[in-house]
Image (tube, grey):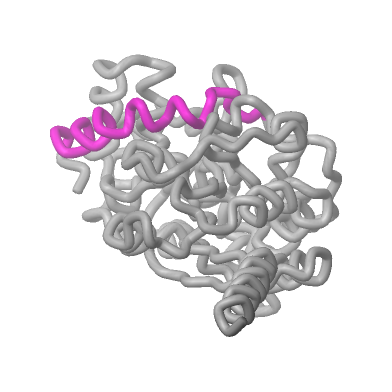
């Protein structure tokens, strides 16, 4: 009799545990944007699934997942930059996701079998209005032109944003020409690479540099800033959409996938599908000034609209990963530190 009651108790405990697991999503995220709080809160309101979130840098999270192994509580890994997602994929951390909804809503060039892009950002050229004519920098290749000697500023060549840009250039113009380009840009540096994209924008506005490259959401933040000094800064620069007459402006992404060891796989797929919903796509655009990955979603973001329409590079983002190692080697050989 006692054993029967014990068995029933254990079964009841198992049912409670299973129910509890169904109500939780464990998210490891390298997106560090406060505006994502509303994105996650909306998911919980819609589904009843509580999100347990751990935020850290990409490498730290990937190392943690590897160390946790089969016992990892992580269901979904989110990050920015295609190369970083590809790195997780190469480590064998993702599980393939079969979802008709995701396949229908996320364009083929913005996904792989194991991970999906949920927002995009463009890498544009910014130029000082007084020292550089916009017509002289209409393509990334123009940054290597000797007439810009002493006028180019950049962040580190080892940063994933620049790695992905180089990976795209390799795909379009080949390794030899890409390396020639990198050496030309290095010869045009106004200073040793340092700082982030916002630092480059400010340096161009101040006249320390003539040109630089930046992700669009940094520019959008400054355009939407309530600080008068930020608006004055933006008045001193020109935003240029590179390569409109060739392959288009380089696009990078923010995205994620379900982990192979995810204990809550159903919740993980549900979360990924939510990120492709109209509501979530608008959060990406309005909250962090990114473009939706889903083409049908219409957003009203004054900063993005102010920058205008442009031709985007249609290169599959998964292909960027294939050239990442070659890209870093080119930067190293060129002296782009």
Q: Is residue 243 above or below residue 68?
A: above
| Residue that appears at 22% across and 55% down | 192
How many dots with numbers? 0
| Residue that appears at 34% across and 47% down | 151
Q: Nearer the viewer, residue 110 or 236?
A: 110
Task: Give the main secondary structure of the magenta stretch.
Answer: helix
| Residue that appears at 71% across and 52% down | 270
Is the N terminus in the top left, top right, bottom left or bottom right quadrant?
Answer: bottom right
- The answer to whether residue 37 is visible is yes
Residue 60's quadrant in the figure? bottom left
Q: Is residue 60 above or below residue 175?
A: below
Q: Is residue 230 left or right of residue 139?
A: right
Q: Residue furthest front?
A: 1
The location of residue 326, given as percent across then percent down, is 25, 28
The location of residue 173, given as percent across then percent down, is 38, 16
| Residue that appears at 57% across and 73% down | 52
Q: Is residue 327 magenta?
A: yes
- The answer to whether residue 230 is visible is no
Q: Is residue 57 magenta?
A: no
Q: Is residue 27 left or right of residue 165?
A: right
Q: Nearer the viewer, residue 126 or 94?
A: 94
In the image, the segment drawn in magenta is 311-334
Q: Is residue 274 left or right of residue 219?
A: right
The location of residue 99, given as percent across then percent down, is 69, 35
The location of residue 85, given as percent across then percent down, is 44, 44
Q: Is residue 206 left or right of residue 270?
A: left
């Amino acid at each position: 009799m006692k054993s029967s009651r014990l068995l029933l108790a254990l079964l009841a405990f198992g049912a409670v545990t299973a129910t509890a697991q169904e109500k939780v999503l464990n998210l490891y995220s390298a997106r560090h944007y406060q505006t994502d709080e509303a994105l996650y809160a909306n998911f919980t309101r819609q589904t009843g699934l509580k999100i347990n979130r751990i935020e850290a840098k990409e490498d730290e999270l990937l190392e943690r997942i590897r160390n946790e192994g089969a016992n990892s509580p992580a269901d979904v890994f989110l990050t920015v930059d295609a190369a970083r997602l590809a790195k997780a994929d190469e480590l064998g951390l993702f599980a393939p996701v079969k979802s008709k909804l995701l396949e229908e809503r996320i364009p083929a060039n913005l996904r792989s079998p194991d991970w999906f892009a949920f927002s995009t950002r463009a890498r544009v050229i910014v130029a000082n209005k007084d020292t550089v004519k916009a017509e002289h920098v209409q393509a990334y290749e123009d940054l290597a032109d000797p007439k810009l000697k002493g006028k180019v500023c950049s962040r580190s060549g080892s940063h994933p944003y620049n790695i992905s840009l180089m990976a795209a250039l390799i795909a379009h113009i080949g390794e030899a020409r890409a390396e020639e380009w990198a050496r030309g840009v290095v010869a045009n540096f106004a200073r040793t690479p340092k700082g982030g994209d916002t630092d480059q924008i400010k340096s161009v506005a101040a006249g320390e540099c003539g040109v630089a490259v930046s992700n669009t959401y940094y520019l959008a933040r400054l355009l939407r800033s309530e600080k008068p000094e930020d608006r004055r800064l933006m008045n001193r620069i020109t935003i240029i959409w590179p390569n409109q007459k060739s392959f288009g402006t380089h696009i990078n992404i923010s995205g994620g996938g379900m982990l192979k060891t995810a204990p809550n796989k159903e919740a993980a797929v549900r979360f990924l599908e939510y990120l492709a919903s109209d509501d979530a796509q608008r959060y990406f655009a309005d909250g962090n000034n990114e473009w939706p990955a889903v083409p049908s979603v219409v957003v009203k973001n004054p900063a993005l609209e102010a920058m205008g329409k442009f031709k985007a590079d249609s290169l599959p983002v998964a292909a960027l990963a294939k050239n990442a190692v070659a890209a870093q080697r080119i930067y190293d050989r060129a002296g782009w530190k």
